[in-house]
Every structure is written in structure tokens, then in C-alpha cells.
Amino acid sequence: MAQLSTTSGIPVATIKYYLREGLLPAGERQGPNQSLYGPEHLRRLRVIRGLLEVGGLSIAAAHQVIDAIDSDLGLSHTFDIAQRTVSPQIDGAALSPEAVAQVDAVLSGWHVSPDNPGRLAAARVLQTFAELGQPDLSGWVPGYAAAALAVAEADLDEIDARTDRESKTEMVVVGTVLGDALFAALRRAAQEHVSARRYPAPPNP
Amino acid sequence: MAQLSTTSGIPVATIKYYLREGLLPAGERQGPNQSLYGPEHLRRLRVIRGLLEVGGLSIAAAHQVIDAIDSDLGLSHTFDIAQRTVSPQIDGAALSPEAVAQVDAVLSGWHVSPDNPGRLAAARVLQTFAELGQPDLSGWVPGYAAAALAVAEADLDEIDARTDRESKTEMVVVGTVLGDALFAALRRAAQEHVSARRYPAPPNP
DNA sequence: GCTATCGGATAGTGACACTGTCTATACCCG
DNA sequence: CGGGTATAGACAGTGTCACTATCCGATAGC
């Protein structure tokens, strides 16, 4: 275990905590006070750290997501679990019908179930803008939807490129979580790029 | 204050807390124990709640972001503050050069400063994938970059559409924060759509 | 045999976002 | 003018979360 700690860079106490929480499977028991940890434990630890630090998940959410990797469900079901775990819980009844209608208008032609977590989350965002008096986002949101569609295609392409089930499942789950972070990061870079192109001299009088 | 609480739906104790933290400016003093709160306080409260609940910011981050709205800096500077506040702090020295090079390859041709928070954050994500042995994401990441570029154009279009400075600044800040949430939400919906289109019958044997 | 380390259990820590209580005042109503 | 209510402000308390520290008995390896 000391070795697992040093190679992963994670304190022993934290590894024990993950074991307790069921995030990390127990090592192979050698005796009452000895266990053996292999490379799969190291890999699992890295998945955990990625989900927690980069993806910003809670321990509980990471647990669900890891269970989804381990259990052999269909791709669709795995996707569903990943999405629900990562998305904030939203009370659909608390949403204004206008915001929901706005989202549905953008999503027209898409095959999206009514309780897709993204649909409700998007409505929540639009409702927040509406409460701030932002009147008309009809020039803004469709661009997002088109970009989201392109990204989703890239996601599915990448999943299809995986051959074995294990790798596919992991890409579904990890890609769902880390993809958000990746896009947000690239968006910041793109904003600087576009901003610099449009306003060559920064306006600081 | 009771009125502010009821119309906003936020408990009095919480409003007092925001006042204490400097998130909400004090009301117009009428006497030693009386202050007047106007519609601008209600609006500010809505901004705060949006940043905290929908954007997932901490109190400290919301504080910085709100200060950026209030202070009259140039657009570029406001953008910079918003981005840095929303992005996770990343130690550039802890990143593997390979991951950074991978990001820079995708960003080639873009005008992005070396310490753009998105550049480092993207490298962090790619490094996490690399640690998980995901070998080749060259089919995946460019799609994200193209989508991010499209979204950034939409962002700047929307900001340009605002006429007065106040509204522009607010859109920069709020758009930076809520745009992440909006895109993530639409991505979930798009994933279901694309997934349903590609695999008409869900594979649950 | 002796020391270091192990697993396991339990308790403690610090950050965070509130939430509740208290006090002294001031407002409003009759 | 008196009493119930609301207010500003200070301060302590709460619950959650992700660790982190300590202790214990047992064993591994020298």
C-alpha cells in the first residue's frame, strides 16, 4: 500500500478513505493484515482523481459513475447514468413554462426524452437569464445547440472507435465528465482568440 | 427587508449573510436600524443566486465576478477576470509538456496568451486522459475546438448586440459563467439525440 | 525477538454556506 | 403613549464534505 501511495502520489490515509467509501476495490488479501494492490488499483485511483479534481464530482457521484463503469449495462443505459450523475438535480415543476418552451424550440427535431437532464438544466439556465431581464437570446442559443450537436457527434465517434466493451464504457463515463471540462477550457481560449481578432487594440483608456 | 426576502424567495438570514460578505450592497440608510432596498437589490440578488446555483460558483468567486461587473474596466479586462475566476487554478509547472503541446497543436493559429486559463485547463484534461492510457484523441479534440470557436463567436455576437456598457459587461460575466452550464446541458440533450439516431434499438439484452 | 508496517475502526479537522439567536433600537397602530 | 413587530448588526451554531490523524492488535521481515 505504501507503494501504491507513492506511485500515485495520494496519501495512504486518503487511499484508505476511498477503500472505505467503496470507490476503490479492496486489494487481494494475503493475510489478515496484508493486501496486494496491482496496476488496476493504480488505474482506478487515477480515474477517481480525474473525476474528483478535473471533473469536480463529489465522492458520491464518483461512486455511482464508477459503478456504471464496472457493471455491464448497455451503452444507452450507461450514458443515462453518467448524465444523471453529472447533471444537477432540477425540479421540473419549478421551471417556468416559457423557459422550457424556449429549450424545446431549440431542440425541435431532436430525439430527446422529456426528462433528459440536459433539457431541464438548459431550461434552468434560460430561466435565470429571463429573470435577469435578458430579453432575447434567439441569436445566441441556437449557436450553442449547433455546437453541442457537433460535439455530441464527436463524442459518439470517439466511443465507436473503441473496440472492447470495457474501453467503450469507460469512454462514455469519463468522456461525459471530462468533456464538459475540456469544452469549457477550449471555450475560454476561443473567447480570447475571437476577442483579440475583433478588437485588435484592447480598450483600456 | 422582509419584502426583499419574500419577493426574492431568499431567507432574511441569507440576505444578511450576503450583505456581510459584500456580495450585496447595503440599502439606503434611513436610520440606525432601517434601510431601503430597491429593485436593483432584487436584481443583484438574482444575479447572485444564478451565479451560485446555476453557475456553481463559490461565494468568493461570485464576489470577484460581481466586482468585475461593477467596476468599469475594458471589455478585455472584464473577460479576463471572469475567466480566471471561473476557471480552476492550475499549476502550469505540474503539467506534462506533452499535454501542453497537444493543446497548443489544436490551438495553432489562434491568438491565445500562454497563461490563458483555458489553455492550461485543457492541458490538464488531456493529461488526465493520457494517464488513463487513452492513446489518441486526435479525432476527438479538434471537433471540440471547432465547436468552441463557434460558441465563442456566438458569445461575442451576443455581447456586441448589447448597446450600453452596463449590459455588455453583465453579459460578459454572466455569459461566461452560465454559458458553460448551458452548453453542458445542451450537450447532454445532443448526446441522447445522436445516440438514439445511431442506435435505434437500445441494446439491453 | 524486535521494530516497522499493515488493515481496520474511530474520531477529529478545516472549509463552506448558511442559519439561529441575541440586543438595542425604531416603526406603526390604536 | 404603550405595546407588538420589524430592523440592523454581531456572533455563535449547524450540517455537509473531503479528507486526515490517531489508535489498536497483528504480522512481516530481519
Image (cartoon, coloured by chain):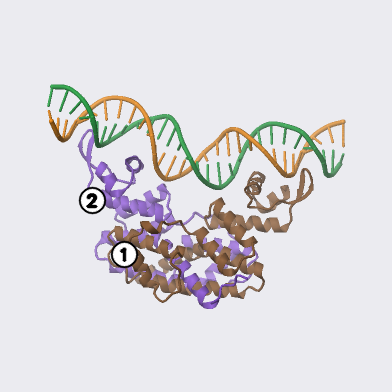
Chain colours: A brown, B purple, C orange, D green
The residue beneath circle 1 is A98
Rendered-image quadrant of the C terminus of chain B: bottom right
Label 2 is found on which chain of the structure? B
Give coordinates of residue D17: x percent, y percent. Answer: 53, 46
Give coordinates of residue C2: x percent, y percent. Answer: 83, 32
Residue at the image position 52 percent from the left and 73 percent from the top: B195
Closer to us: B101 or A16 = A16
User: Residue A137 is drawn in which quadrant?
Assistant: bottom left
Q: Which amino acid does label 1 sit on?
A: Glu
> Left or right of A145: which side holds C4?
right
User: Residue A77 is drawn in which quadrant?
Assistant: bottom right
Q: Which mark is residue B196?
A: none
Check disc 2: other Cα within 10 Å, few if <14, some if 14-19, many if 20+. few
> Left or right of C16: which side holds B19?
left
Q: CA gap, disc 2 to disc 1?
A: 23 Å
Closer to us: A176 or B69 = A176
Check disc 1: other Cα within 10 Å, few if <14, some if 14-19, many if 20+. few
Closer to us: A178 or B98 = A178
Residue at the image position 40 percent from the left and 72 percent from the top: A107
The residue beneath circle 2 is B39
Q: Which amino acid does label 2 sit on?
A: Pro
Label 1 is found on which chain of the structure? A
Tell me, yes or no, if residue B76 can be seen here.
Answer: no
Closer to us: A143 or B121 = A143
Label 2, secondary structure: give it: helix
Look at the picture and state if B130 lies above or below A110.
Answer: above
Give coordinates of residue B24: x percent, y percent. Answer: 31, 46
Give coordinates of residue B151: x percent, y percent. Answer: 41, 70
- Number of labelled discs? 2
> Left or right of A104: which side holds B140?
right
Depth-wise, is mark 2 or mark 1 nearer the camera? 1
Mark 2 in CB contact with mark 1 (< 8 angstroms): no
